[in-house]
Image (cartoon, helix red, strand yellow):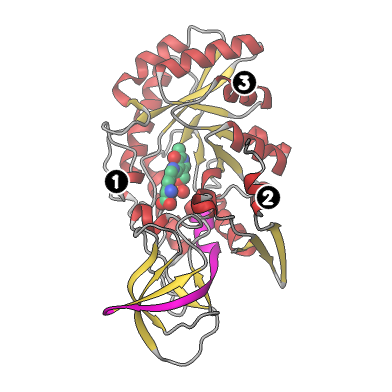
Amino acid sequence: MYVYSARQIRERLQLFQEAFSSPASTVCFAVKSNSSLAILRLLAQSGAGFDIVSGGELERVRRADKAALKRVVFSGAGKQVWEIDAALKAGILLFNVESEAELELLARRAEAAGVRARFALRVNPDVFADTHPYISTGLREHKFGIDIGLARAIYRKAAKSKWLEPAGVSVHIGSQIRTVDPFAAAVKRVADLVLELRRDGHSIHYLDAGGGLGIDYNDRLDRPHFDAAKKVRDYSAAVLRATAGLDAHLLLEPGRFVVAQAGALLTRVLFVKQNGAKTFVITDAAMNDLIRPALYQAHHEILPVVRRGKSQAVVDVVGPVCESGDFFARDREMQRSAPGDLLALLDAGAYGMAQSSNYNTRTRPAEVLVEGDKARLIRRRETLKDLLAGEIL
Ligand code: LLP
């Protein structure tokens, strides 16, 4: 099961909200990082907006808190007609448009709905961010955004449509970025573009700086050194410096930073087995529950829930899925475990449950939210009946 701390989620959101309190800004939580309804509601009630990438995520925001729909920005390179229509009807804040073709479609759908669509172009600033190649997005070779050099011409053309309202510019250069310099460089390019667009006569009010601020997955619970408040301060200082004097409404889209360290995946040890020189700890969780190690070679700290003595062992922690990529840790020194032990995989609150699947016909875990001294089930464990419900024989 996944377990989350409500307090930490609120605290992290608040760090962002306070760091960006002046000039006015909206922190739009990236729903893709953790889309559980109870967590979205908690964030909405703390004043968060939301960054969505699908009609499904829009529906989640609606169910979590209708009042938050007006604080939604809609990103994503492949929006479909029904998704655009639903977002127009919901009256979201901003469409982050990623291609000319999408902009043309947005204009047609806005006309059909009889409303004007506020949009920002997501520009590709051609800035390198040092992170895993699968989650880096800000270079020209990536599929994301529109070449920043082409933006002015596209805004000029869009301004002629009475169904489109050029309202902002957005950027997102990638995820799990650990230094602030790439953010500063990207936002500076966007801020310069905002000035040019205003000179061209567009009233650009929003600057969406995207998400991407990284955490420290190597941080140890017993020896913590990660200072979240300082991280956010450094990040906001860099973004605010790059936008100084612009008088724009900033939008931020953090996901990981808000929820990753607030969540752990609890798993039980099934067997411990020796293959030659190697020891494998086989757990009941697998890559279908948390795919980050398999997909991005990501590191997650693993702690025994009950500490028993000091006996250590070097082990691979692996799941039952039939792939060698199904591991949580390799050659990790940790407390010797025995069948029945509970282990906690830390920093699993972001891109954990949200990226889970039913691979190997495995049902997905339950989720629990801890508030003070109370723990509340926010998603029951999936059953085989749920899993097979949609299939037709
Ligand atoms: N905004 C946009 C447009 C994004 O594409 C993303 C993440 C975010 C905001 C939030 O980024 P964050 O603050 O969470 O870094 N599954 C990967 C991460 C994929 C990130 C995709 N886009 C992982 O587990 O590391």
Location of ligand 1 given as a quarter of the image: top left
Where 92 sits versus 225, above or below? above
In the rendered structure, does residue 263 fall within the stretch colored magenta?
yes
Q: Look at the image and tell me whether residue 19 can be seen.
A: no
Residue 338 covered by magenta stretch = no
Magenta segment, prevailing SS (helix, strand or loop): strand
Secondary structure state at the residue bearing disc 1: helix
Amino acid, disc 3: Asp
Q: Is residue 97 above or below residue 339?
A: above
Please give the residue where the numbered disc 3 appears in the rendered image: 85
Q: Is residue 154 left or right of residue 248?
A: left
**Mark in front: 1 vs 2:** 2
Name the one closer to the observer, 60 or 259: 60
Residue at image point 56% right, 53% down: 18
Q: Nearer the viewer, residue 393 or 280?
A: 393
Real-space CA distance between mark 1 and mark 2, rounded to the nearest whole angstrom:
38 Å
**Picture layout, residue 390 above or below residue 327:** above
Region of the chain picked out in magenta, as a range: 257-277
- Which amino acid type is shown beneath numbered disc 1? Pro
